[in-house]
């Protein structure tokens, strides 16, 4: 058996290629949208990808099932209770499919979503289970959140009850030695307590996973429905789009280059300018109206949290990063990239009167500003779980992804300081506020972490 895990750090997303070396047949499970890695690995191993299996309709990324099916002729497979708009094979609960010697057994495990299923992998038909691909039902240290579909017809309580039954009646019945291969790791908004480990075992999760160890179904419901991080605004968009026929991604196609006049024309017509440079570099000079989402961080997730899915996007990147930026946005279905800034650094120099710098404060400067400006507006853009341990200067708390919908809670005429945990999200938020007309906005270098260190050492 060939078994490969692919892990995409920027989305905390795990996908899998499983191949039978006797029959040369392979499947890909929960693929990312840019599929060249799977195609290369299969070709190098002499394998034919015959099935693309989705454990559920994903909300946090746009899956590559259509791209893989078009490239290989593979069948797209979903749980029998799923009803996507494209041609697919329905998989029944308990169904087993042989790739040759390798056998896949499918177990319906609703809860994170109604159509969720898990895949038990056997190296041979008579062997003990090798592993189980749990999708978003069971993570390492956590379970899938049951509240993401509440906005489209399912209550979190209904799904949480299904999740409890799926965990205990389907997954925890597997042998302790069975390896757990989840679809996400730490950083994903699909849960609240995900481990940095990428694999575990059923036995380890039985002993260590807080949700599995819940004393009753009622206790489980309370545990998994409270304290979840805010879902990025693009989640519903992707959950719906993953059900539909759509355009395929050409991951080799570069967006067209745009000069300054073309960029300004696009912005005047409603496009947004997304600057993917490091926050420090962005702060030293950027085009007016640009929103800073650094490519060194969770670029697609935060762009998808603050940029509407229905607007055109112009990219400003370090030279050579244009294609990567376009493809990373495409991973969440943001395909309306109409161009990239041509010769970006020359543009900043030649259009100096139309550039601006961004104010960034050290922790000491932040404290001084609090002392010297009585009406200072302070915004903590961390998630509720982070804020639970404390905030700085009684800040107003608005997670960064909620700022577009909660702008009316802020006063654009007040001097404003924004902070997060380390300085990445605060640059996103501060640049967004400037783009929305806030004239005096600063963020804190090093964020709450630096502020705490400075306060404790004072």
Image (cartoon, rainbow, N blue to C red):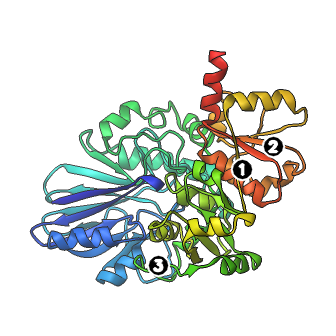
Vertical comparison of 440 with 324: above or below: above
User: Which residue is under mark 2?
Assistant: 416
Q: Quadrant of the N terminus?
A: bottom left
Mark before the other along the chain sequence, 2 or 3 = 3
Callout 3 crowding tier (Cα within 10 Å): few <14, some 14–19, many ≥20:
some
Residue at the (72%, 80%) spot, across then down: 265
Rounded to the nearest whole Å, what is the CA distance between mark 2 and mark 3?
38 Å
Q: Are marks 1 and 3 in contact (CB under 8 Å)?
A: no
Q: State the residue lying farthest toward the front.
A: 350
- 435 vs 273, left or right, is right
**SS assignment at label 3:** loop
Give residue 430's mark: 1
Query: Residue 217 at x, y = what percent?
Result: 54, 38
Foreground residue, 415 or 228? 415
- What is the C-alpha distance between the residues marked 1 and 3? 29 Å
First in sequence: mark 1 vs mark 3: 3
- Which of the 4 quarters of the picture holds residue 250? bottom left
Q: Percent from the top left, x then y, of residue 120? A: 28, 56
Judged from the image, the secondary structure of the residue bearing numbered disc 2 is strand
| Mark nearer the N terminus (1 vs 2) | 2
Q: Quadrant of the C terminus?
A: top right
Give the residue pinned by disc 3.
Answer: 254
Q: Report, in whole angstroms, how far the alpha carbon at label 1 lies from the one at label 2.
A: 9 Å
- Which one is nearer the viewer's eye here, 284 or 207? 284
How packed is label 1: few (under 14 Cα within 10 Å), some, or many (20 or more)? many
């Amino acid at each position: 058996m060939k078994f490969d895990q692919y892990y995409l750090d920027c989305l905390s997303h795990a996908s899998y290629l499983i191949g039978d070396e006797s029959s040369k047949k392979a499947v890909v499970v929960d693929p990312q949208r840019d599929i060249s890695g799977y195609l290369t690995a299969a070709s190098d191993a002499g394998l034919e990808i015959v099935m693309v299996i989705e454990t559920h309709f994903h909300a946090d990324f746009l899956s590559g099932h259509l791209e893989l099916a078009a490239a290989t002729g593979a069948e797209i497979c979903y749980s029998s209770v799923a009803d996507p708009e494209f041609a697919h094979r329905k998989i029944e609960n308990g169904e087993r499919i042989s790739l040759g010697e390798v056998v896949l057994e499918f177990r319906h495990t609703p809860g994170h979503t109604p159509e969720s299923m898990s895949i038990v992998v056997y190296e041979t038909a008579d062997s003990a289970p090798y592993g189980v691909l749990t999708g978003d039902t069971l993570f390492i240290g956590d379970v899938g959140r049951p509240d993401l579909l509440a906005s489209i017809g399912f209550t979190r309580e209904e799904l949480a009850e299904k999740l409890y039954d799926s965990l205990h009646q389907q997954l925890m019945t597997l042998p302790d030695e069975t390896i757990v291969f989840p679809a996400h790791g730490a950083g994903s908004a699909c849960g609240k307590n995900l481990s940095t480990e990428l694999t575990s075992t059923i036995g380890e999760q039985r002993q260590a996973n807080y949700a599995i160890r819940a004393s009753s179904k009622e206790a489980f419901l309370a545990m998994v429905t409270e304290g979840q991080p805010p879902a990025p605004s693009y989640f519903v968009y992707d959950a719906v789009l993953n059900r539909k026929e759509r355009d395929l991604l050409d991951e080799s196609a570069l967006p067209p280059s745009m000069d300054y006049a073309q960029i300004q024309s696009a912005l005047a017509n409603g496009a947004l300018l997304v600057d993917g440079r490091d926050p420090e570099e962005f702060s030293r000079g950027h085009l007016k109206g640009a929103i800073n989402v650094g490519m060194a961080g969770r670029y697609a997730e935060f762009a998808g949290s603050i940029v509407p899915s229905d607007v055109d996007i112009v990219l400003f990147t370090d030279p050579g990063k244009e294609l990567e930026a376009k493809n990373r946005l495409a991973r969440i279905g943001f395909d309306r990239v109409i161009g990239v800034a041509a010769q970006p650094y020359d543009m900043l120099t030649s259009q100096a009167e139309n550039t601006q710098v961004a104010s960034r404060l050290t922790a000491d400067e932040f404290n001084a500003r609090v002392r010297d400006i009585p009406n200072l507006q302070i915004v903590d853009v961390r998630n509720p779980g982070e804020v639970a341990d404390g905030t700085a200067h009684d800040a107003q708390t608005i997670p960064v992804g909620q700022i577009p919908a909660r702008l009316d809670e802020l006063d654009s005429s007040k001097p404003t300081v924004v902070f997060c945990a380390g300085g990445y999200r605060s640059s996103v938020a501060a640049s967004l506020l400037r783009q929305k007309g806030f004239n005096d906005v600063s963020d804190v270098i090093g964020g709450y972490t630096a502020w705490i260190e400075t306060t404790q050492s004072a």
